[in-house]
Amino acid sequence: MTNHKNFLISEVLSLAPNESYSSTVANELKVLRNEKIEKPIIFVGAGTCGLGAGADKTLLAIKEYVSINKIDIDIIETGCIGLCSSEPLMDIQIPGKNRLSFEKVTSDLVIPILSTVLWHNIIPEKNVLGQFTTGENEPWDNVKNIADHPFFKPQTRIVLQNCGICNPISIEEYIAAGGYRSYLNLMKTSSPIKVCDKVEQSGLRGRGGGGFPAGRKWKFAAAEKADQKYLICNADEGDPGAFMDRAVIEGDPHRLIEGMAIAAYAIGATKSYVYIRAEYPLALKRLNIAIEQAMEYGILGKDIFGSGVDFEIKIKMGAGAFVCGEETALIHSIEGKRGMPRPRPPFPAKEGLFGKPTIINNVETLSNIPTIIEKGEEWYAAIGTEKSKGTKVFALSGKVALTGLVEIPMGTSVRDVIFNIAGGIKGGKKFKAVQIGGPSGGCITEQNLDIPIDYDSLLEVGAMMGSGGLVVMDEDNCMVDVAKFFMDFIQRESCGKCIPCREGTRRMLEILEDITHKPSNGSSHHALRRFKGITQIEKLAKVIQETSLCGLGQTAPNPVLSTLKWFRHEYEEHIFERICRAGACTDLRTFTIDVEKCIGCMLCVKKCPTGAIIGAKKTPHFIVQDKCISCGNCEAVCKFDAIRIN
Amino acid sequence: MKEGTKEILEKYANADRDSLIPILQEIQDVEGWLSEDSLTAIGRHLSMPVSKVYGVATFYNQFRFQPQGRNHIQVCRGTACHVLGSATVLSELKKKLKINVDQTTKDGEFSLEIVACIGTCGLAPVIKINDDFHAGVTSESLDEILESYKEKVNN
């Protein structure tokens, strides 16, 4: 290990910007990048999602097999490559050959796969995902290249390029692949303001949701004069349905560290924080290891590589408050206060953490930086659309065939993402809508599926980029229920500081609950309340949008407004006809008894909490609709399948 | 004051207010919850009114003011999990354990908590028991999962 360290520092990191490697050095780097190997390597996708799918058991099975058969082999735990629905993933690389990837490798499949590949060099028929082009190694016959897999082919991977492929806790591998050179070269060749210029010209916009040009934001802080400036990396990915930041930190933490170091140099910050969710223990662990490694190499710390620049990274764990994704609330949380936002201006770039100029960027934004510096701003600006440059990572989940993380150039159509990359809707059901941007966003329906994904086009149809969660819904999902779900989330997460958000979201939730619940007595008073509520909901939404203090409140009504815009008929059905066509609002179901099937066992009569079922023994029973509260108890206890639900 | 709390506070000698949340987290990690004694001790240590300490602690979802069960269940209520039926999983769990959210069963075996999003949306619906993730949970598979944890305690 120390050998590698001295070698990498003297032969790679200390080179002048335009110096290239000698052939012996290049050879050694191939070894470190696992392109030239002496003994086989097994890679296991062990991100949180992989572990959830059973990668820990797969790993145990591999270790057991290796120790029983006394095989000399390396086992590497990688992050997530993005194809969550195929996990657990196991890759095998044997000397001289390309790396092979296998999907859905549960622990019982480990022995059959390992024994055929390792002992006989034969590829099993099932579970093969594809092969990676690994340096100049010999390819396997009749195995597709993974880059041609329909899930990966349309992707342009910048932020995710190492995720699931390299060893996330090996700084050697990261440096051997060219990492940290951009940062160290930059300090020798560019002034901080030039770095800001470069990033501004690349067109990179904040990936956390706001979409503010990153370079311009940096310039505000760079222009401030202060004895101390701070950089904060926002890894408080509270948006339900988004998990790209977790995957990047688990799969490639050094990329984030390099991005942070470059940003800090550009704005003149010497101290920084990563504010990370406590719900991500694995990401936390790997980031800690990576920071320690970078300090050992002298890439973090004092007087970095003799440049006179200091930079340190501290980790602060979030404590489970969605509102802390907002800049000023996040700052309060780091200061040890209740995480409540404050009015802006002054913006954090002027007065932020502990009253000092502070720049807050999201994980994905910062992880783009090393590549922008390495390949140049023109290269980056060539990807994407006119106003939205580069790529965006999306977290695909819900009712699609393939779930996981995809990184696509801006401007790709929503239809492409759902039907080409993600393989369409699961189980042959009909597509209904895709929710984009989490609780602040909106939904995109069939008619808008062809719009290009970029910041502005999404706003035009009433949705927004947000942090990039794409939750796909089919005909079994009720849009009123989805709107209610988001309202429930927002009103729980509202910090309570300003009234429109605290009270308004609560009232909106009540209105939605009124139309999805069956009142205990169907009096006209309830009906009146229902109508009154729904006539006021749009007005209330507008007030909340216009008068809330922070982004959480200002965008809180979006899911309701968006579903109301595209699925007004569903709302009307709930209100007038009292039915939920998707069957998701269980309170609106009507229960009847099939007289042909009912044998009169009296079981449901006994279990009905409201006494709504009448009937004598051995004669078919009957449900009194006025008394029924749609709890479903009768259906659960009936042994003769006699309860029908509409 | 328990030994654990004392040790943690000693580690944070001369700490400022910005250490408050890390201290609360560490104490909860060791003791499983935040007792009144702990909160008072923290206030004294940081020269802050206990009311302020309590104010901060109650703001964040992570902190608990009751002891948790031997097995702590976290149900993910993120969007992807919701779309795939986490509401049913939650109500089923409540029924089976006969407790509400943020409560502990009488025998101290299980406690139940809702979390906003665990971040494994591709495997929805997800529940997390102690440190283990369970993917694609259905009301049918719950029995088996719960049973496996009861066994662990008996052994």
Image (tube, rainbow, N blue to C red):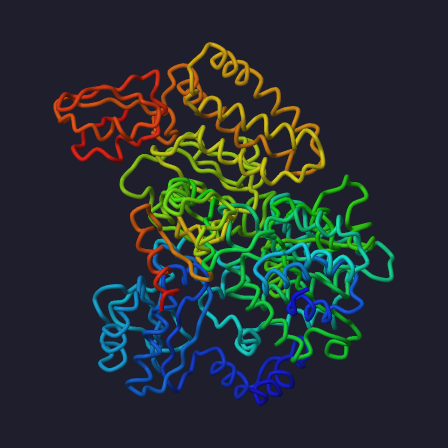
Image height check: is A380 above or below A183?
A: above
> Relative to residue A52, is residue A618 drawn left or right?
left
Between A412 and B40, the residue placed more toward the observer is B40
Residue A185, percent across and down? 69, 72
Q: Residue at x 61, y 76 (%)?
A: A293
Between A241 and B63, the residue placed more toward the observer is B63
Q: Residue at x 38, y 56 (%)?
A: B134
**Residue A418 in sight:** no
Residue A367, percent across and down? 59, 60
Image height check: is A196 above or below B13?
A: above
Q: How many marks?
A: 0
Q: Residue at x 53, y 88 (%)?
A: A24
> Relative to residue A586, is residue A503 drawn left or right?
right
Quarter of the picture containing the N terminus of chain A is bottom right
Quarter of the picture containing the C terminus of chain A is top left
Residue A87, percent across and down? 36, 60
Image height check: is A193 above or below A462?
A: below
Q: Residue at x 32, y 79 (%)?
A: A64
Image height check: is A97 above or below A532?
A: below
Most extreme residue toward the top is A524
- Occupied quadrant, residue A235: bottom right
**Residue B118 in sight:** yes
